[in-house]
């Protein structure tokens, strides 16, 4: 499996691992269990930006309220994710089922195909969603 193909398989764990491998300081900050994505916002931002730049793809992490915690398009961090017109991200946050959708936005006026999957903790609780350019 190629590195870029692993993103949908391991999701946020890959992002954290990628950030930790890139910086020993990050590795020491990562706990054994996610309780709240905002506790890891700095690590997620680092990982999303590094991986997004390496792959040349858009990657976004949102919390349970669809607020963007990390994004390769940094000016969108802190805003509610508005690009899923049929509420695909909201549905993933409710039922955990992976979905695809087309984002048409200022950043992608011609549209870009995205996928989204739930980010869960060890107990299976949904903490947020990972959204990536397909």
Image (cartoon, rainbow, N blue to C red):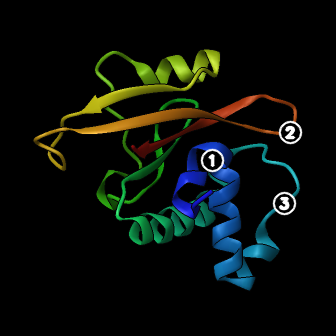
* Residue that label 3 marks: 31
Q: Which residue is drawn at 18% across and 50% down?
A: 107
**CA separation in Å, label 2 and label 3:** 12 Å
Is residue 110 positioned above or below 21 on the image? above
Residue 83: in sight, yes or no?
Answer: no
Could you tell which of marks 2 and 1 lies nearer the N-terminus?
1
Q: Which of marks 3 and 1 is in front?
A: 1
Q: Position of residue 66 (x, y in %)?
A: 47, 32
Task: Name the element at disc 3.
Answer: loop
**CA separation in Å, label 2 and label 1:** 14 Å
Task: Name the element at disc 2.
Answer: loop
Is residue 4 positioned above or below 98 on the image? below
Please rate how many residues cluster around mark 1, counting C-alpha atoms within 10 Å: few if below 14, some from 14 to 19, many from 20: many
Residue 103: in sight, yes or no?
Answer: yes
The label on residue 11 is 1
Residue 120: image quadrant is top right
Of the 4 image quadrants, the one containing the C terminus is top left
Could you tell which of marks 3 and 1 lies nearer the N-terminus?
1
- In the displayed structure, does residue 15 sit left or right of residue 86? right
Q: Which residue is drawn at 79% across and 65% down?
A: 30
- In the displayed structure, does residue 45 sit left or right of residue 110? right
Q: Which of marks 2 and 3 is in front?
A: 2
* Residue that label 2 marks: 122
Q: Which of marks 2 and 1 is in front?
A: 1
């Amino acid at each position: 499996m190629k590195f870029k193909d692993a993103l949908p398989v391991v999701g946020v764990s890959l992002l954290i691992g990628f950030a930790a491998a890139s910086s020993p300081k990050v590795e020491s900050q990562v706990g054994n269990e996610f309780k709240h994505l905002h506790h890891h916002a700095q690590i997620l931002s680092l990982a999303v930006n590094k991986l997004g730049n390496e792959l040349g793809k858009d990657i976004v992490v949102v919390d349970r309220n669809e607020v963007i915690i990390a994004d390769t398009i940094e000016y969108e961090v802190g805003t509610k994710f508005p690009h899923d017109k049929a509420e695909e991200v909201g549905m993933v946050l409710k039922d955990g089922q992976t979905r695809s959708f087309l984002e048409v936005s200022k950043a992608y006026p011609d549209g870009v195909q995205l996928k989204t999957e739930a980010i869960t903790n060890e107990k299976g609780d949904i903490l947020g969603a990972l959204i990536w350019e397909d």
